[in-house]
Image (tube, rainbow, N blue to C red):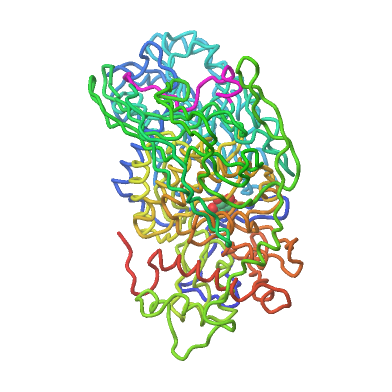
């Protein structure tokens, strides 16, 4: 390993060697970024059977059945099935990078899982052909990559394969299989990974010629062809309109139990539970971000709030192949909207304080009731979705916005369930960033009708009722924050004479705030006196935990050096302070802090499982979880995951990844949830609540607008304040308000010209000031060093601490380096540098996190 070079750092345990001698590195603009890959070293492959069962159920609940002609699925008991496609064997369980690099104790594949159940008869002759070919053409990413890049063996970070070459098969072999089996299952696979975008190329977004030929051969020879798509991202599906495919099942990347889950679905042991968390368009080019995605310097978010279905349903419904929220089951449902109760009334309580703190008016909720009946012949559960259409006014509005959803229980044929969905009236508000309503920088309800639609997806939802706002209602007055500084034109809506929505463009409102003045007027006071009181009695953090001293009292006694140490991680990944292969430590990273009872907290990735040297469960990816539209089930899974964190030595899980699926090509979409902020926020809140119910911490990331991987450490996401608040921050806001994460991670990229880790307005004005977030904030791993444009005396971590981002992770000055960056204490000692109060503010956040996760002596954790 790279031993910790922090001057004061003394390992609590013996230093360990690098988790991997050939640690992958990522080359990026701005330097090398070392990401130690935690190769399995420990022997214990045991996993909690409850977690295994929950993971299997979650993967099936997320699987989306998009077509099922003539009831091709489920496969009849004992049916003879011919499996095509190498992915039946080389099943892709997860994507690559920090969100996938888990030492899973095992992973299943579809061929073996189908054999294992014995529910159908697998055509073994064909299976034998694939097994022999796969053995000769291995799909291990390392081998494939190294074969293509012999000069740099081992250096495959960010070079992950998108897919593995398909086995060509001749017509005779396909016809022979068709003479033995009645149903064909074609399995296609796509991988994706961090630091690499999916590409508009065969093998990534498009089918390869061999895959296309395979589908043509199989659909020509078989009366029934089922296609299983093992992918974390949306890919081109235009071919389902050209080929006689009977059934199409999107499996997502389901983790170690994913193939078993898909077996359950194919054989009908479990229903396909998923609904699409993203719109699937006929052509990539029809998407609203297509022309403004992937630029390495800056991307204008011209589509504004019209992201995903908000765009398609408003301006281009005919471009949609499969609408948002859709998904078939093995039965049918009737959703009868019952009543809509509630009213919009004015509330003068919406205020903003001089410090920027906001108070939201309490407007109550509207309740939407529906009666769901299973009208088919098999048991199943339905997802009832509620969409709103807001009145035309000064603000352009999408035709539909998801405002609520609920999953029924498993209903027997003929059974009925009454569903009541509460939609907070405040959540119907829009953010006026231009002043067109007369209330700039406020969440408002413009006058008019708020129509509510209820149904099984965004297209099938029917109007159930409406609320009327007789006049403009101000839901929350805020102050402008994080607005764009570079002009661009954003999409807006104009009604044609026929009432149809027509796209127009308008200039995006630019920032007007003097950030320097805002920051100076709100510098935090030092606690316990300007000099940092040196009290008579030594106070330890254990005294604080035992309520024998206040946290402020403890912090007031810390020296500037000790305060500064709390603003850095323990320098490297795989910190010797914690379990092997961890992502780094924070908190008690020095001997002098530990002497005061400040413990280190150990971070690990990530969204699909704990990424350390030990074996750990590999869980369904974020998109699969969101597709279940079932936050309660996600929470249960995450609670079991939290239990595994306790057992494996992870205090902070760097999860959930919750950036919006702005564009299907983003390489990390599989880690994230959806194109919709409500589904994203609810899914993330469920993960956070579940994990934190066991006493450990989640860490939602990447705050904010990490919507592409191309040049992710330097690219600028330029986005209007309205789209920020309604789309890109909204999921985070829901997660913070619903689940109070103890930790959050900023993004690598810039947002309107400012890097996430220096973004005062995002983290201090909005996240803390307006949403009331009280936890700690860490950077993504190694941040870009830079001077503060508003305070020339500040740079690097001093700039960061002034912005309100507490901890540089893993803590070194350069990507992959071992030397701690020391600008915090240096800045404090220099003229015009950061203040004691700012260092203390950071210390308070970090120490509160340690107390919240129960690491301090005398504390106990939930189990
Ligand atoms: C990723 C984060 C991850 C961190 C630590 C970064 O490259 O963007 O999501 O948590 O590494 O592995």
Looking at the image, the residue that sits furthest to the bottom is: 536
Quadrant placement of the N terminus = bottom right
- The residue that appears at 54% across and 19% down in the rendered structure is 321
Asked if residue 131 shows in the view, the reply is: no
Quadrant placement of the C terminus = bottom left
- Confirm whether the magenta stretch covers residue 497: no
Instruction: Residue 757: name its quadrant.
Output: bottom right
Percent of width and height locating residue 406: 36, 34
Asked if residue 81 shows in the view, the reply is: yes
- The residue that appears at 44% across and 48% down in the rendered structure is 609
Task: Check the image and report above or below for 506 versus 844.
Answer: above
Number of marks drawn: 0
Observer-nearest of 712 and 14: 712
Observer-nearest of 281 and 23: 281
Percent of width and height locating residue 102: 47, 48
Instruction: Residue 777: name its quadrant.
Output: bottom right
Percent of width and height locating residue 586: 51, 67
**Along the horizontal axis of the image, is 717 left or right of 101?**
right
- The residue that appears at 58% across and 62% down in the rendered structure is 355
Instruction: Residue 241: name its quadrant.
Output: top right
Observer-nearest of 256 and 826: 826
**Along the horizontal axis of the image, is 530 left or right of 755?**
left
Instruction: Report the magenta residues as a range.
Output: 312-335
Percent of width and height locating residue 14: 47, 72
Observer-nearest of 563 and 344: 344
Task: Check the image and report above or below for 660 versus 654.
Answer: above
- Confirm whether the magenta stretch covers residue 320: yes
**Along the horizontal axis of the image, is 543 left or right of 722?**
left
- The residue that appears at 57% across and 58% down in the rendered structure is 356
């Amino acid at each position: 390993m790279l031993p910790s070079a922090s001057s004061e750092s003394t390992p609590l345990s013996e230093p360990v060697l690098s988790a991997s001698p050939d640690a992958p590195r990522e080359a990026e603009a701005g330097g090398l970024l070392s990401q130690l890959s935690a190769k399995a070293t420990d022997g214990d492959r045991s996993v909690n059977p409850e977690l295994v069962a929950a993971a299997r159920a979650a993967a099936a609940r997320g699987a989306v059945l998009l077509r099922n002609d003539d009831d091709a699925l489920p496969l009849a008991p004992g049916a003879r099935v011919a499996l095509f496609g190498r992915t039946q064997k080389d099943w892709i369980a997860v994507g690559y990078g920090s969100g996938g690099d888990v030492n899973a104790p095992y992973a299943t594949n579809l061929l073996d899982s189908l054999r294992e159940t014995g529910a159908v008869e697998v055509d073994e002759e064909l299976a034998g052909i694939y097994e022999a070919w796969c053995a000769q053409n291995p799909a291990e990413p390392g081998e494939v990559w190294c074969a293509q890049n012999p000069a740099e063996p081992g250096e495959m970070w960010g070079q992950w394969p998108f897919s593995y070459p398909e086995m060509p098969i001749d017509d005779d072999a396909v016809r022979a299989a068709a003479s033995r089996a009645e149903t064909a299952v074609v399995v296609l696979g796509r991988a994706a990974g961090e630091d690499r975008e999916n590409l508009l190329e065969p093998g990534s977004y498009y089918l390869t010629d061999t895959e296309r030929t395979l589908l043509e051969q199989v659909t020509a020879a078989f009366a029934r062809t089922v296609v299983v798509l093992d992918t974390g991202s949306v890919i081109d599906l235009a071919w389902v309109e050209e080929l006689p495919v009977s059934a199409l099942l999107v499996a997502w990347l389901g983790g170690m139990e994913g193939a078993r889950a898909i077996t359950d679905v194919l054989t009908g042991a479990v229903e396909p539970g998923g609904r699409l968390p993203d719109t699937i368009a006929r052509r990539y080019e029809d998407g609203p971000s297509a022309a403004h995605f992937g630029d390495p310097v800056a991307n204008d978010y011209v589509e504004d709030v019209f992201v995903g279905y908000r765009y398609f349903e408003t301006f281009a419904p005919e471009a949609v192949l499969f609408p948002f929220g859709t998904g078939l089951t093995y039965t049918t449902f009737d959703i009868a909207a019952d009543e809509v109760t509630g009213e919009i009334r004015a509330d003068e309580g919406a205020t903003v304080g001089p410090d920027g703190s906001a108070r939201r008016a309490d407007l109550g909720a509207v309740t939407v009731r529906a009666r769901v009946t299973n009208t088919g012949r098999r048991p199943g559960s339905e997802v009832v979705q509620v969409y709103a259409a807001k009145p035309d006014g000064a603000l352009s509005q999408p035709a539909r916005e998801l405002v609520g959803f609920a999953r029924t229980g498993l209903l027997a044929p003929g059974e009925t369930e009454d569903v009541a969905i509460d939609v907070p009236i405040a959540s119907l508000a829009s953010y006026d960033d231009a002043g067109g309503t007369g209330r700039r920088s406020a969440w408002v309800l413009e006058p008019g009708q708020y129509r509510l639609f209820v149904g099984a997806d965004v297209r099938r939802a029917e109007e159930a009722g409406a609320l009327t706002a007789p006049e403009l209602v101000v839901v929350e007055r805020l102050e402008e924050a994080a607005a764009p500084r570079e002009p661009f034109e954003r999409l807006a809506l104009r009604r044609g004479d026929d009432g149809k929505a027509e796209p127009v463009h308008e200039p995006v409102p630019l920032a007007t705030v003097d950030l320097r003045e805002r920051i100076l007027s709100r510098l935090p006071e030092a606690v316990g006196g300007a000099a940092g009181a040196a009290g008579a009695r030594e106070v330890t953090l254990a005294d604080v935990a035992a309520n024998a001293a206040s946290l402020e009292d403890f912090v007031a006694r810390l020296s500037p050096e000790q305060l500064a140490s709390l603003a850095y991680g323990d320098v490297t990944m795989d910190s010797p302070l914690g379990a092997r292969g961890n992502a780094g430590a924070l908190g008690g990273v020095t001997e002098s802090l530990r002497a005061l009872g400040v413990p280190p907290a150990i971070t690990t990735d990530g969204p699909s499982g704990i990424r350390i040297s030990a074996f750990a469960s590999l869980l369904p990816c974020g998109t699969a979880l969101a597709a279940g539209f079932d936050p309660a089930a996600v929470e249960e899974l995450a609670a079991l995951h939290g239990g595994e964190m306790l057992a494996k030595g992870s205090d902070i899980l760097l999860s959930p990844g919750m950036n919006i699926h702005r564009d299907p090509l983003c390489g990390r979409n599989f880690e994230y949830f959806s194109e919709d902020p409500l589904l994203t926020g609810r899914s993330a809140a469920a993960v956070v609540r579940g994990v934190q119910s066991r006493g450990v911490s989640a860490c939602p990331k990447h705050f904010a607008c990490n919507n592409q991987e191309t040049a992710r450490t330097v690219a600028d996401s330029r986005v209007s304040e309205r789209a920020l608040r309604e789309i890109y921050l909204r999921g985070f806001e829901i997660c913070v308000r619903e689940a109070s994460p103890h930790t959050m991670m900023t993004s690598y990229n810039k947002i309107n010209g400012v890097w996430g880790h220096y973004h005062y307005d995002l983290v201090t004005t909005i996240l803390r000031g307006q949403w009331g977030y009280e936890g700690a904030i860490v950077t993504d791993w190694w941040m870009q060093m830079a001077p503060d444009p508003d305070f020339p005396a500040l740079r690097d971590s001093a700039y960061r601490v002034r912005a309100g981002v507490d901890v540089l992770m893993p803590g070194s000055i350069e990507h992959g380096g071992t030397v701690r960056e020391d600008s915090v204490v240096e800045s404090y000692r220099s003229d015009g540098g950061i203040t004691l109060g700012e260092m203390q503010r950071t210390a308070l956040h970090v120490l509160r996190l340690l107390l919240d996760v129960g690491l301090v002596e005398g504390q106990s954790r939930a189990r």
